[in-house]
Amino acid sequence: MKEIIIRPKPKWQLVDLEEIWRYRELLYIFTWRDIKIRYRQTLLGVIYVIFQPVVNMIIFTVFFGNLAKIPSGNLPYSLFVLIGLVFWNFFSGALARASDSMVSNESMIKKVYFPKIILPFSVIVTFFFDLIINFLLLIIFAVILGYPPNFWILVVLPFSVLISGCTIAGASLFLSSLNVKYRDVRNVLPFLIQIILFLTPVIYPLSIVSGRNQHLMALNPMTSVVEAMRMVFQKNPVFNPILICISVFSALLILYFGLWYFQKTERYFADIV
Amino acid sequence: MKPIIEVKHLYKKYRIGRILPYYTLSDILAELYKKPLNLFKRKKIGIDGLYEDEFWALKDVSFNVCRGEAIGIIGKNGMGKSTLLKILCRITPPTKGEIRLRGKVASLLEIGTGFQQELTGRENIYLNGAILGMKQKEIKKKFDEIVDFAEIEKFLDTPVKHYSSGMYTRLAFAIAAHLDPEILIVDEVLAVGDTSFQKKCLEKMESTTREGRTVIFVSHNMEAVSDLCSKAILIRNGSIVVMGGTEKVVRLYKQENLDTSAKIHL
């Protein structure tokens, strides 16, 4: 049996993967709990999950596509915006809930020891299931409209999931830690998410932005996720490697920062929460 | 053989004087606006290097526990018992000092931690077991035992929000009692439930120590402490007053209580 040593300052470690592995069942059971409660309380169940992107798509198509006539390249606007929304909903939903995960599990944090990093992670996994459902819906919709995905999907889909996962994890680790100390993070967050929506090319194509600003926008990893995903449904996909590199770098930086801040503050959560 | 728990010169500092344990950004800004220097101006007082709004919840606590021992921790409210347990369970870090634990720890600081109202009894057994550190396989193996002990067979598939408080407590304790840790840390959780169930819980804990496991037990119930523990620790104002045979320590504690109540009567 390994000896556990409790000291004021433990040895520095950005993330204790071994411990997370030991607690993997807890990750699984938290996820299972979230999914179960969600579907038990809402009669609509799975329908609820696809409801949001579909309604958003219809509204956006009417107002931005038909009325404002925002260009959407070779794709019909409805498909164009749905691609963006599927990943945007994953990002915004998971980020909002994960940032609240420490505070909403306050009673547990105060009474039992477990690697708290599991809490935001389980939220992300939960929303990943929604993403799968929504993505299937997207494929069906695209095929019906006559835009079946090309082979790039095999590369772009894992890439997109990974990059958005890193971004959500990093951002929510930071925000959930901050939320423990400053409870108004909760109130600011919806506003922040709304701003990021407009900084992500969900309702408009990145091509309407000037070249230099495109590089700036790529600092938001979701920009490349949405743009790359759209290429999957094009006949002749063109990827911009510079933008993708910027986004990958930015996502890793966000993840690193989130882990660092979380690691620094985590030990005192039980004292302040 | 090395002791299973080694606590060396443990200190824990807390801050008081804040109305809220947490703040909002706007509070901070408002405060900063009113008294811009306040954030940097805190007076140091005392020889132990404390600021004026700080105090020691634990002060130089050291003790060892051997394998198979049951130790009772007693003391009045607010004397540092729960803080000690929280550090032992790794919920909060010490300010100074060190603890070495040489065995798997399970803690029960509150009954039903993480119970989910919407989920059924069956589901909560798995959830709560996992939170307390059990593997799903272990839970499956002990499932019937847990249900038997809690006496809730009929309500297994009812959401726990419809449970009576007695059923709730029984289920929560049953899960915790079937953890198989080498070190079991239990806070005052037996205060709930009726006497017959309390007795059942104590018996279960006794059999735990007979199996060679170590129990750390905090309680205000001196009878329970005397029954279960061979040794006890009396804590006052964050320091250990005495550690020794339960009988002696309990007598001292009762004496202490008598003295204060005598003062109140005067």
Image (cartoon, coloured by chain):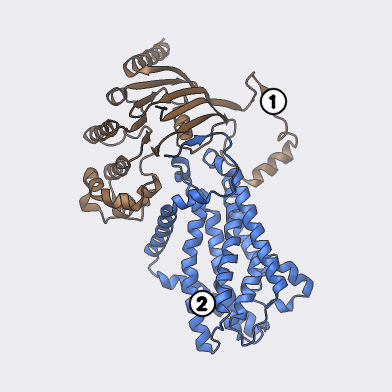
Q: Amino acid at mark 2?
A: Val
Residue B161 in sight: no
Q: Residue at x 72, y 33 (%)?
A: B38
**Residue farthest top in this picture:** B266
Q: Nearer the viewer, residue A83 or B54?
A: A83
Q: Are marks 1 and 2 on the same chain?
A: no
Q: Colour of chain A?
A: blue
Q: Nearer the viewer, residue A219 or B171?
A: A219
Q: Which mark is residue B43?
A: 1
Secondary element type, mark 2: helix
Chain letter behind tag 1: B
Secondary element type, mark 1: loop
Residue indicated by mark 2: A54
Distance from Cα at disc 1 to Cα at disc 2: 60 Å
Q: Residue at x 55, y 83 (%)?
A: A149
- Note whether B111 is above or below A225 in the view shown: above
Q: Where's residue A3, x and y in %? A: 46, 36
Q: Residue at x 34, y 27 (%)?
A: B69
Chain identifier, colour brown: B
